[in-house]
Image (tube, helix red, strand yellow):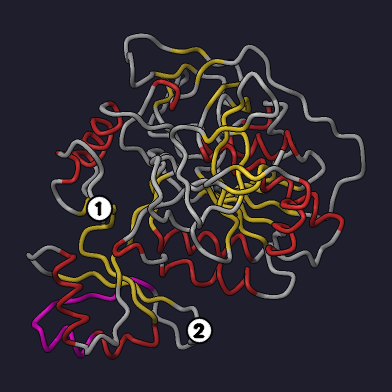
Amino acid sequence: MSCCEPPLGVAYLQVLLSRRHDIAVYPSDALDRDAPPEGMYLYRPAEVLLPVSQVELFTVTAKRLGIRYWRLDEQSDELRPDAIARFAIGVNADLDIVLDRLVRAAGAQLRVTPNHVLLTCPVWGLSPAGEPLVADTLPTPKDDGDPWDVIVAVIDSGLPEGFAANQLLAGVDVAPGDEEQWAYAGPHPVLTFPQGHGSFVAGVVRLVAPRAQVRSYLAADQDGVTDEWYLGEQIDLALADGPSVVNLSLGATSRHDEPLMGLGSLQVAASAESGPIVVAAAGNLDSQRPFWPAAEPWVIGVAAVEMSGDPEVLTRAWFSDYGPWVDVCAVGVDVVSAYEAHPYRPLTDPSQLRHFKGAAIWSGTSFATPRVAAAVAGLRASDPTLSRDRALALFAASGVDVPGIGTFVE
């Protein structure tokens, strides 16, 4: 995720939505305002999610209201407690209004939400620091021991073809076909924001915890965009591999600030004994508004710290979200990690390409998050049954509390 400061980020989002008809914003005039309006969220137009157990209630209610609908997911006879159904609805009215009508007509028993869009780089404003900068050298991980029996699942925008040529990424495992799908082709590709996000995040885990098994899963496209339904599908693939830690350097605000329904299977897994510990970015909106999934009580939500000249002084990065739902913080400003060895066209000055040689400097809560995921991996290597709450207690016992953003994790 990237830092935010108007007006560049608003312009970026306006361009993104103008060419992506599969993304909508609520309220519809949100990007015409000077600041993010209360209740703003991104979603897939005309798509809704609901528990499979409420499909009959939804269809009966929709028919009564004259709302057309189509089931989009593969129907299954297996009814898991966390199973979610995905529908498209055919209406001309604002989706938010239609959802209110459905809930009222069902007697407030129906749980139905938009299919929220999540971003790896959620932005309102976007400062130059929010884009990757060229780093002269790439740090080398100190691998001085036997590998840990710990898998860190990095569910993000994937890795590009040829990623193993980068010394920091060479040890990352990638599921077949999960290399990052760029929006360009040819022998001399040029990257654009926010491409390279998944590589950078995976590199941070490798740098901080080189003895962990890092596994990359492709969930976001070349624009850093995914939705809660598809993300849930990719999470299920990752869970099948038995990860000890799940890193989610992405997120979203939501309708009525409610948790994302599409991540139910991850909650079930994380709540089980010895289930994966989920670590997620708190977001870069300089806001106390809950950012999901970091705000979930079963997730470790990570804010970003900016180091001053005095190593004893820890300051919340100006872009980082904060609040009682944030659990811990880590360095998230001027982080150095792996980046593709290709030119990059910056948003700030598209006429001047930046030429990367495998390393970058980047800022955001996205890049504080894998530092915490790596630290959790180290704890899990010593105690495979370690719980989220126990991990937080261990951090609190040895760390410094930073007001508004929790315990600092080195």
Tag 1's secondary structure?
Answer: loop
Is 62 included in the stretch rendered in magenta? Answer: yes
Q: Nearer the viewer, residue 1 or 237?
A: 1
Q: Nearer the viewer, residue 169 or 249?
A: 249
In percent of width and height, residue 279 lies at 60, 53
* For residue 175, above or below residue 304: below
Is 251 included in the stretch rendered in magenta? Answer: no
Q: Is residue 301 visible?
A: yes
The residue pinned by badge 1 equals 38
Quarter occupied by residue 400: top right
Dot 2: within a 10 Å radius of its alpha carbon, few (fewer than 14), some, or many (20 or more) residues? few
Q: Residue furthest right?
A: 145
Mark 1 or mark 2, whichever is nearer to me = 1
Q: What residue is shown at x 34% (from left), y 86% (from top)?
A: 54
Q: What residue is shown at x 78% (from left), y 47% (from top)?
A: 398
The magenta-colored residue range is 59-73
Q: Is residue 199 visible?
A: no
The residue pinned by badge 2 equals 81
Tag 2's secondary structure?
Answer: loop
* For residue 361, above or below residue 118: above
* For residue 374, above or below residue 14: below
